[in-house]
Image (cartoon, rainbow, N blue to C red):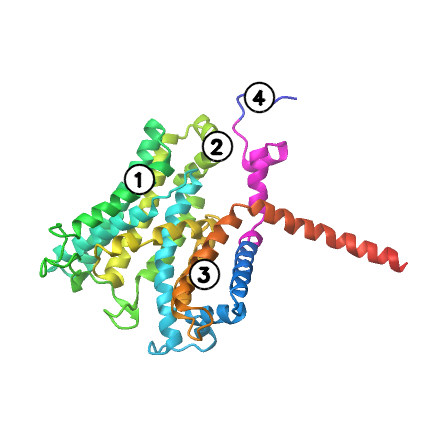
């Protein structure tokens, strides 16, 4: 019996039941639930431990120091005293987590529309530049409107920067991976120019220093844990948590989210159903860029306050957002936990190895190694799920064999 050609396109579940290979693959990924990302992280840490062991160090002590260095030991001894080492370390970990949440969402949203946004770094930098400019130039404004203008301008800038790649994808078919990579380099060189010698955003008080002006006090985000001006944890953390909620609600509860997911699952079927593929490609990339631009704004207004020529190429948080999104399987909850994991690794490896388990000059490389392993095994999530399911199937067989042997 053949299906009527006028029937609507299959849903993922229907396609899986009728034997579509791509749909079955997607169903297997969803069936993994939380198991696959957890196993992915555990395997990455296990292999990282073997590398630490191969260098003659104790991996258990190394991971213990990273845990404490990230301030996660504060959970067992909570205190509001920021002078406490654990409290301070946790506040810095949460600062990193805030940025990684937004950069992870920048990758995840585009991914749900079938695109791979490699340009989070460029979109983050553009948002950061605009926030610095607006944060300095409107110094006499009241705090609330000043903050809103700076954050809003940076978010729009990030959206416009990513929208270029979406527009090229929708109109001439330019692959978003190539265009976003090129846009990253353009954003980097723009930063080198605007903060460099004679640049439009170079420090007005000292023209010999290739660094920006500090944002005005009226544009600095209020802090709730720590001391203003000393890299304290600010309200950006709650903005990032709110962004996770918005991300989840938009994708699951709105027409926009439905269309984005439909285009990501099958553009041809979405077009057949009356959904504009081109429009959704452009706006999905723009929304992704808005998340990254917001991250740049919150960092600039929250604790950076200025940026220099040497800081531009050194920044890589946008690229780390790719690993966060992949580990989190492009879901709101997953991105949140993935950001916390990588935020803890970033700060813990550089500040936590106090017992010199590993040479501090090499400790940061452990973060990159685990990050790479996570990305590697996320790409093999179906294989991990297969191994996990095989273990579950073998267990009943082993019990039956033991029962038969004892009979």
Label located before the other in sequence (2 or 4): 4
Residue 276 visible to an observer of this rendering? no
- Closest to the camera, between mark 1 and mark 3, is 3
The N terminus sits in image quarter: top right
Quote the CA–CA distance across marks 2 and 3: 38 Å
Q: Are marks 1 and 4 in contact (CB under 8 Å)?
A: no
Q: Give the number of the mark in front: 4 or 3.
A: 3
Residue carrying label 1: 182
Which region of the structure is painted magenta?
8-37
Mark 1 or mark 2: name the one nearer the start of the chain: 1
Could you tell me if the residues under marks 1 and 3 are in contact, i.e. CB atoms within 8 Å? no
Q: Is residue 132 visible?
A: yes
Q: Nearer the viewer, mark 2 or mark 4?
A: 2
x and y percentages locating residue 131 in the rendered image: 21, 53
Query: In the rendered view, does 374 fall on the left or right side of 184?
Result: right
Instruction: Give the residue at mark 4.
Output: 4
Disc 3 secondary structure class: helix
- Residues under labels 1 and 2: Cα distance? 27 Å
For the residues labelled 1 and 4, the Cα–Cα distance comes to 45 Å
Q: Which badge, 4 or 3, comes first in the chain's sequence? A: 4
Q: Main secondary structure of the magenta part?
A: helix
Task: Tell me the residue that label 2 is attached to.
Answer: 266
Instruction: For label 2, count other residues whose C-alpha is less than 10 Å away and answer few (under 14), some (14-19) or many (20+).
Output: many
């Amino acid at each position: 019996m053949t299906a009527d050609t006028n029937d609507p396109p299959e849903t993922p579940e229907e396609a899986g039941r009728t034997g579509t290979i791509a749909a079955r693959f997607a169903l297997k990924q969803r069936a993994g639930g939380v198991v696959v990302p957890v196993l992915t992280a555990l395997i990455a840490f296990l292999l990282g431990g073997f590398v630490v062991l191969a260098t003659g160090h104790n991996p258990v002590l190394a991971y213990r120091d990273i845990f404490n260095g990230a301030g996660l030991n504060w959970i067992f001894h909570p205190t509001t005293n920021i002078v406490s080492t654990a409290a301070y370390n946790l506040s810095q970990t949460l600062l990193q987590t805030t940025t990684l949440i937004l950069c992870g969402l920048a990758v995840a949203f585009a991914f749900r529309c079938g695109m791979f946004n490699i340009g989070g770094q460029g979109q983050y930098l553009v948002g950061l530049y605009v926030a610095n400019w607006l944060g300095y130039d409107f110094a006499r404004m009241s705090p609330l409107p000043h903050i809103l203008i700076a954050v809003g301008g940076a978010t729009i800038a990030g959206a416009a920067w990513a929208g270029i790649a979406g527009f090229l994808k929708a109109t001439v078919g330019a692959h978003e991976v190539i265009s976003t990579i090129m846009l990253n380099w353009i954003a980097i060189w723009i930063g080198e120019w605007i903060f460099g010698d004679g640049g439009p955003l170079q420090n007005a008080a000292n023209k010999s220093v290739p660094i920006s002006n500090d944002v005005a006090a009226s544009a600095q985000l209020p802090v709730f844990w720590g001391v203003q001006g000393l890299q304290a944890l600010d309200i950006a953390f709650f903005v990032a948590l709110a962004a996770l909620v918005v991300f989840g609600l938009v994708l699951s509860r709105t027409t926009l989210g439905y269309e984005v997911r439909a285009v990501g699952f099958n553009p041809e079927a979405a077009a057949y159903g009356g959904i504009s593929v081109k429009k959704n490609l452009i706006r999905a990339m723009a929304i992704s860029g808005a998340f990254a631009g917001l991250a740049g704004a919150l960092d600039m207004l929250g604790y950076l306050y200025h940026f220099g020529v040497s800081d531009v190429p050194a920044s890589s948080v946008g690229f780390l957002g790719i690993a966060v999104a992949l580990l989190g399987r492009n879901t709101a909850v997953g991105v949140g936990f993935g950001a916390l994991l990588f935020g803890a690794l970033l700060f813990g490896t550089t500040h936590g190895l106090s017992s010199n388990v590993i040479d501090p000059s090499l400790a940061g490389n452990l973060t990159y190694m685990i990050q790479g392993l996570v990305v590697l095994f996320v790409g093999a999530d179906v294989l991990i799920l297969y191994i996990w399911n095989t273990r579950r199937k073998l267990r009943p067989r082993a019990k039956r064999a033991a029962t038969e042997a004892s009979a």
